Image (tube, grey):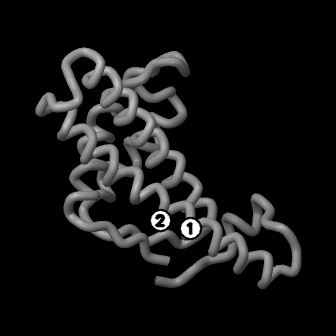
Amino acid sequence: MILYCNFEELRALAAGAELLAGGVCAAPSASVVAPCEATELIESLLPRLTGDLSLATLAEQRRVREAVAAICEGLHGRLDNTVLAYSPAHEEAVNLYFDYAHARTVLDRVDRIGTEMGAMIELITGGPVTAESAETVTFPD
């Protein structure tokens, strides 16, 4: 399946990924640095942010979803900090709002694709999604 992304969404995800993928791990309460496990997923997503993403399996969709969710969380935390430090009208706050909004839109599309993939796997296999079926059932572009 193809996850379609426009230029602004790709730019926002890349900016958020670069913000978080510095290789530094943080405590779960940190708002700007991703936890170690999410950092690896973000770093693997970063080179793919050049155009639409092909999601061949549900397991791949789940990894992309986790990375995009971590980017959204990081951007949201950075937005909150900037708004509180300056004001909602501050230029950086406005830019962060749009980055967060674009990333959040992609996260919604990734979630919908995951729901569709899961439903198709259940239809094909006649049972609930398993770790094996999430890895082995493929979806063409």
In the figure, residue 76 lies in which quadrant?
top left
The residue drawn where x is 83% and y is 80% is 125
Q: Position of residue 111 (x, y in %)?
A: 56, 61
Badge 2 density bin: few <14, some 14–19, many ≥20, Cα 10 Å = some
What amino acid type is highlighted by mark number 2? Arg
Q: Position of residue 34 (x, y in %)?
A: 44, 29
Asked whether, in this view, residue 33 is left or right of residue 69, the answer is left
- The residue under label 1 is 112
Closest to the observer: 1 or 86? Answer: 86
Closest to the observer: 89 or 100? Answer: 89
Of the numbered discs in the image, which one, if any, rests on residue 76?
none
- The residue under label 2 is 109
Q: Position of residue 32 (x, y in %)?
A: 37, 25
Say whether marks 1 and 2 touch (CB < 8 Å): yes
Dot 1 falls on a residue whose secondary structure is helix
Q: Position of residue 72 (x, y in %)?
A: 41, 42
- Between marks 1 and 2, how big is the CA–CA gap? 5 Å
**Does 97 appear above or below 123?**
above
Asked whether, in this view, residue 46 is left or right of residue 125, the answer is left
Dot 2 falls on a residue whose secondary structure is helix
The residue drawn where x is 88% and y is 73% is 127
- List the single residue furthest toward the right: 127
Asked whether, in this view, residue 16 is left or right of residue 64, the answer is left
What amino acid type is highlighted by mark number 1? Arg
The residue drawn where x is 25% and y is 67% is 6
Number of numbered discs overlaid on the protein picture: 2
**Does 14 appear above or below 136?**
above
Closest to the observer: 107 or 67? Answer: 107
**Does 125 appear above or below 128?**
below
The residue drawn where x is 84% and y is 68% is 128
**Does 64 appear above or below 136?**
above
